[in-house]
Amino acid sequence: MRFLKKAREFIDGNYKTPKGLLGTFIGEKMVKQHKTETDWSLEQMDVQEGDRILELGCGAGYAIKLISEKDLAEEIVGVDISPTIIRSASIRNKRAIREKRVKLVQANLNELPFQNENFNKIFSIQTIYFWVDIDKTISEIFRVLKPDGVFVLTFSDGKEDDTWKSIRDITENQVIPHMRKAGFKDVSLMRGPDSRGYHTVAVRGMKK
Ligand SMILES: C[S@@+](CC[C@H](N)C(=O)[O-])C[C@H]1O[C@@H](n2cnc3c(N)ncnc32)[C@H](O)[C@@H]1O
């Protein structure tokens, strides 16, 4: 039992920060597991000619690849803290990186290494569970977003008949209030299509 518990913790840790061979495998597994919420999040992003887009916690780079294939955005940047996952995302987006249409940066989403008002669209999929300082991260997002820019934060808040109280509390008592405090307008919680039985939701806000 103890071994199984340790193994579970080890695997869960690899969802938080994928490392090594298992981390590479989990990065690819997440690409498959998060397809529904990724496609839906990109619909919300409504990619347009000349967009400058940032993804936080980009994982193995699947969303970035979908965006770059549209060949509309002026700049697409993916940030992730894990060197293992940056490697996977680099392999997946090799050509676009070579053509300088995509850039991947190993960094903490708490401290974004970008100048003020650099992007007009920012999104993040299935990462909120790992944010250690929600207030600071939202301030950083607001700082690097251009006026009229949009931020979409997608995650799961339940499965089948079950709603997860802890993540609902974080959404209602931290994410949404911190976004309003930072200056985001029209902050709303949207419901997307279920993914493998998990409820897909997103908080969306605009910098006006
Ligand atoms: C559950 S995965 C989701 C990956 C991808 N967005 C997807 O939907 O497949 C969470 C990702 O967030 C990254 N991450 C966790 N904490 C982070 C942090 N503080 N800064 C940047 N990235 C972080 C992890 O390395 C991992 O790639």
Image (cartoon, rainbow, N blue to C red):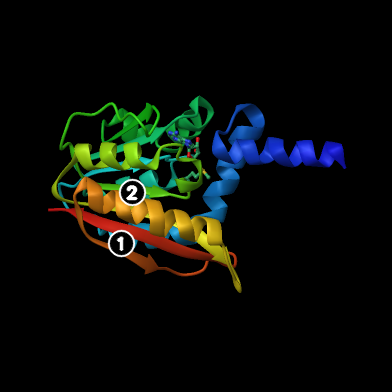
Residue 172 versus residue 2 in the image, above or below = below
**Is label 1 in a helix, a strand or a loop?**
helix
Q: Earlier in the sequence, mark 2 or mark 1?
A: 1
For the N terminus, give its image quadrant: top right
Residue at image x 54%, y 61%?
165
Q: Residue furthest right?
A: 1
Q: Could you tell me residue 68's position as x and y percent?
A: 31, 45
With 189 as the anchor, is 157 left or right in this view?
right
* Residue marked by disc 2: 123
Residue at image x 20%, y 37%?
143
Using the image, tell me which numbered label, if any, was put on residue 44.
Answer: 1
With 166 as the anchor, is 56 left or right in this view?
left
On the image, which quarter does residue 100 sit in?
Answer: top left
Q: Residue furthest bottom?
A: 161
Between 199 and 100, the residue placed more toward the observer is 199
Task: Tell me if mark 1 has few (under 14), some (14-19) or many (20+) residues whose alpha carbon lies within 10 angstroms of its own.
Answer: some
Using the image, tell me which numbered label, if any, was put on residue 122.
Answer: none
Q: Could you tell me residue 90's position as x and y percent?
A: 43, 31
* Residue type beneath disc 2: Phe
Residue 18 versus residue 191 in the image, above or below = above
Let me know if residue 200 appears in the view: yes
Q: CA distance from mark 2 to mark 1?
A: 10 Å
